[in-house]
Image: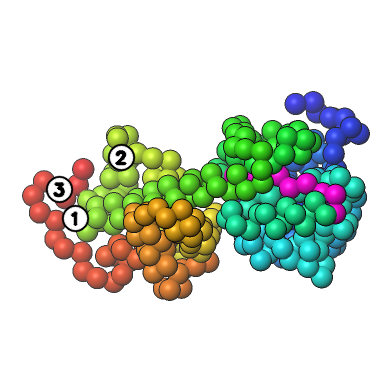
Amino acid sequence: MPSNPDTSARPVVAVLGLGAMGLPMATRLAEIFAVHAFDLNESRRRLAADRGVSVAGTAREAAAGADVLLIAVRTEAQLVEALFGEAGVADALADGAVVILTSTVGVKAIPATAARLLERGLELVDAPLSGGPARAGAGDLLVVVGGRPGARAAVDPVLSHLASTLIVVGDAPGDGQALKTVNQLLCGVHIAAAAEALALADALGLDRSATLEALGAGAAGSFMLSNRGPRMLEAYDEDGAEVLSRLDIFVKDLGIVGEASRSAALATPVAMAAEQLFLLAQAQGLGAADDSAVVRVVAPALRNEPVPEATGAHASI
């Protein structure tokens, strides 16, 4: 990458939402683009400024004249408010600008949003992503894209700088949301299964760290086990794991999975069981904790229940 890249021919990018994913994406994009960012949270704005991102005073100020708007919010309601609410930014963007939706909001939210943007001469590229904050900052994300070909081409430089894997799912906004819904089904199930497996190891008196190492080296290994497993072990500490992905996001996402499966008349009993585990965790006040804290629902040592005495040769690995 050039040390002083020429940004004169590059689109101006606005980033709305500087949360766990929005901040590293804004930082990554600011390496080669003119980026103007905003978040309602003052501490997130300060963090962005500390990382060299140009931070605006309002969302409309950040979006003013931008060619590309990357929006990283949590819910459909936040998306609609950010674009079309009282302080919405849709009317502040440059003519012909493209909005990149990186959030997981579900398929049904997309048609009306895309139509309202088209009325203003704006395009929507549906580009939900997966990979976590560290990979976002390194440009190593999986991004699945749905959008009209011309709009996709306009934002390809932006998405390519964020993604190591960029998959075009279809030519309509909403196609990306559909694939991300499938992705979240697997992710939610894998996290829930990892929590149950480590809780069972604990209940059997096995060494938790040795168990995690053994499982990760064999056929039971998965990205979620290797990524969330160490953080689940931190759940045994008083402060728990650093919040990299809030637990209530999977409550939302597995709710989207359930809605999609019902609309398709498809049974997804394993995903729904995983959703119940996350709902139980949220009911126990863990919604704002890292999603690895779901292990607290089932691990006996974290529920203040006695751990049965280990027997035989299974006391350690």
Where does the image place residue 120, in percent across and percent down from the top left? 85, 54
Residue extent of the magenta highlight: 120-129
**Disc 2 + disc 3, Cβ < 8 Å:** no
Which residue is denoted by mark 3 in the rendering?
A: 314
Left of 234 or right of it: where is 38?
Answer: right
Q: Quadrant of the N terminus?
A: top right
Query: What's the amino acid at mark 1?
Result: Leu
Q: Residues within 10 Å of mark 3 (few under 14, many from 20)?
A: few
SS class of the residue under badge 3?
helix
Quadrant (top left/top right/bottom left/bottom right) for the C terminus: top left
SS at mark 2 in the image: loop
Q: Residue at x 43, y 41 (%)?
A: 223
Q: Nearer the viewer, mark 1 or mark 2?
A: 2
Name the colour scheme.
rainbow
Residue matched to label 1: 204
Distance between mark 3 and mark 1 Cα atoms: 7 Å
Q: Earlier in the sequence, mark 1 or mark 2?
A: 1
Return the residue at label 2.
220
Q: Secondary structure at mark 1?
A: loop
Residue type for callout 3:
His
Q: Is residue 315 above or below residue 302?
A: above
- Numbered label attached to residue 294: none
**Residue 287 sits inside the magenta stretch:** no
Marks 1,2: beta carbons within 8 A: no
